[in-house]
Amino acid sequence: MIIVTRPEHDLTTKYISLWAEEIINLARKKGIKVVDLKRDKANKLELSGRIKKLSPRALFINGHGNESCVTGHDNEVLIQDGDNQDLLKGKIIYAVSCKSGDVLGRSASELKGTVYIGYKDDFVFVTDQEHNFRPLLDPKARPFMDASNQVMISLLKGNKAKEASRKSIKKFHDNCQSLLTSNADVDSLTAAQFLWWNARNQVCLGNVDETI
Amino acid sequence: MKNKELKTNNETINIAEEEKKLVISRLSILSPSTVISIGSEGNFTVSELIDSVERGDRAGEKIVEIQLEWLRSFKEMATV
């Protein structure tokens, strides 16, 4: 079983939430139970309760955050280092959440049987205003979301956490390379820089040999 | 930034201004429909981001940092 948090209160969370549907669909296709905490259900009380009651194998956290926390709908803090990080014990976590791979990730990775994949700096991506109402069709966002989703896709295929992270980082680099050589549009170089930045900041901490 | 710390105050100011100019010139050629999401800092149109770089706020500083780190990575590759 996996729990997914999907706040949708601004453009960034709307994009990562909608792109996370691909992962939910894939997991269900593979017969893995998914608890989808979407919009206002992505709150601390709901998440804590579900983790305690259901003991999921993995958490796929989408949202904002900082070095020491990840947040849900309307930026409510879900997991905070020094408060309730023990909820992550024994789990595989992928957090598309800025900077949480730094303090929270390191702290969680010290818990027994826990692996934390996240970003130690801001997760940056490009969108096109003309597609902001249809994020799944946004060609500028696709290279970022595809590379990010690769973590969960690889985990769902049974790969170890370290391999899932390696494949995602490779995808960021491959997409970066494609943009640099394509001259597709005037944004290519800038988008390539942001893909490189995300690859550089993705971390996989803790028991990296864990699988779902 | 390390290379700045080695400079005198006047030189540091000049480098910061040169960095800003470089980043703004890169941003100014982007498509006007482009929106950049910078984590918790928010979403920015190209013109908003140029303003941020000029003001030197957190979003602006982040964009400058990314561009400079990108350039440094090439320098590192060239010296390996």
Image: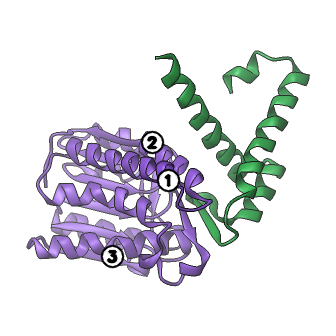
Chain colours: A purple, B green
Q: Are marks 2 and 1 in contact (CB under 8 Å)?
A: yes
SS for callout 2: helix
Residue sitting at 87 percent across and 30 percent down? Answer: B14
In the image, which disc is placed on residue A201? 2
Q: Write down the chain letter for disc 3.
A: A
Q: Is residue B15 left or right of residue A60?
A: right
Figure check: A126 above or below A205:
below
Q: Which residue is mark 3?
A: A37
Figure check: A109 above or below A53:
above
In the image, which disc is placed on residue A159? none
Residue sitting at 31 percent across and 50 percent down? Answer: A168
Mark 2 / mark 3, whichever is N-terminal:
3
Mark 2 / mark 1, whichever is N-terminal:
1
Amino acid beneath label 2: Asn
For marks 2 and 3, give the one nearer the viewer: 2
Q: Which residue is mark 1?
A: A123
Q: Is residue A180 left or right of residue A30?
A: right
Q: Is residue B59 left or right of residue A150?
A: right
